[in-house]
Image (cartoon, rainbow, N blue to C red):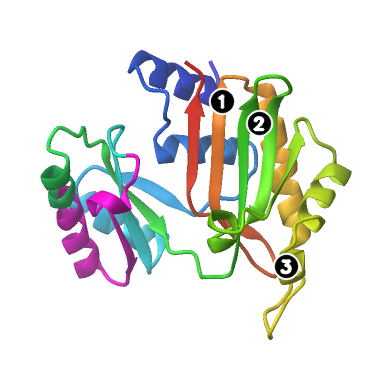
Amino acid sequence: MDLISQIFDNATREGRTVLLEPEAKTICMEYGIPVTKFKLATSEEDAVKYAGEIGFPVVLKIVSPDVIHKFDVGGVILNLKNRKQVREAYSKIINNVKHSKPDARIVGVLVQEMAPSSTEVIVGMTKDPQFGPALMFGLGGIFVEVLKDVSFRVAPITERDAREMITEIKGYPLLKGYRGMPPADVDTIVQILLKTSKLVTEHPEVDQLDLNPIMVYEKGAKVVDARMILSR
């Protein structure tokens, strides 16, 4: 059984449809989708050790099948710059979650590199009852939450489809560089869209997917947060 099938099998055995963040990111990596460096810590000592291996600054995030909105329960602490801060943050996150959701099962704490800020984009997928998996692309942040400036295509998509998805959103000029900001690496966004298309086409078990935000740089990009939901 390959790694992705093992992840799906494990989630099904545990009665979960929502994959844990490290599981979703591992699947992305299997498809060559760039993600932030991460390691799952199950103790304070692990967290400190992994932060040193990944390199500061880092982010700590709760990993629990019972916590979907991590920020709401104090389950995320950003921009930790040294071992002391990581040690304190680990304990704080565990205590916050135990206080907010006493029954939550805690798998561990994700130690993740703090991606430098840049232009944020989102790649998503939802299942259309008639056409199957539909890919979505847009700018991240308020652009997707307020302006709904997104484009859609039914998977599988071609490179031409991917480029059209990127250029047809209203915010496309922002990707070309603005107010001294360098242009975003559109070729890398195209590759992320194509690889996501391949992933959801080859794995119909995936019912919903969100890669949000993806930080796009002048060269390259990194998926900061990944969410996948399996079909029931």
* Cα separation between marks 1 and 3: 29 Å
* Front-most of residues 142 and 29: 142
* Residue type, mark 2 in image: Leu
Q: Residues within 10 Å of mark 3 (few under 14, many from 20)?
A: many
Q: In the image, which disc is placed on residue 206?
A: 1
* Front-most of residues 10 and 120: 120
Q: Position of residue 108 (x, y in %)?
A: 26, 41
Q: Secondary structure at mark 3?
A: helix
Q: In the image, which disc is placed on residue 175?
A: 3
Extreme-bottom residue of the structure:
180
The residues colored magenta run 68-94
* Residues at discs 2 and 1 in contact (Cβ within 8 Å): yes
Q: Is residue 171 left or right of residue 214?
A: right
* Residue type, mark 3 in image: Leu
Q: Earlier in the sequence, mark 3 or mark 2?
A: 3
Camera-nearest label, 3 or 2: 3
Q: Residues within 10 Å of mark 2 (few under 14, many from 20)?
A: some
* Residue type, mark 1 in image: Val
Q: Secondary structure at mark 2?
A: helix
Let me know if residue 20 is in the magenta part.
no
Q: Is residue 123 left or right of residue 81?
A: right
Q: Secondary structure at mark 1?
A: strand
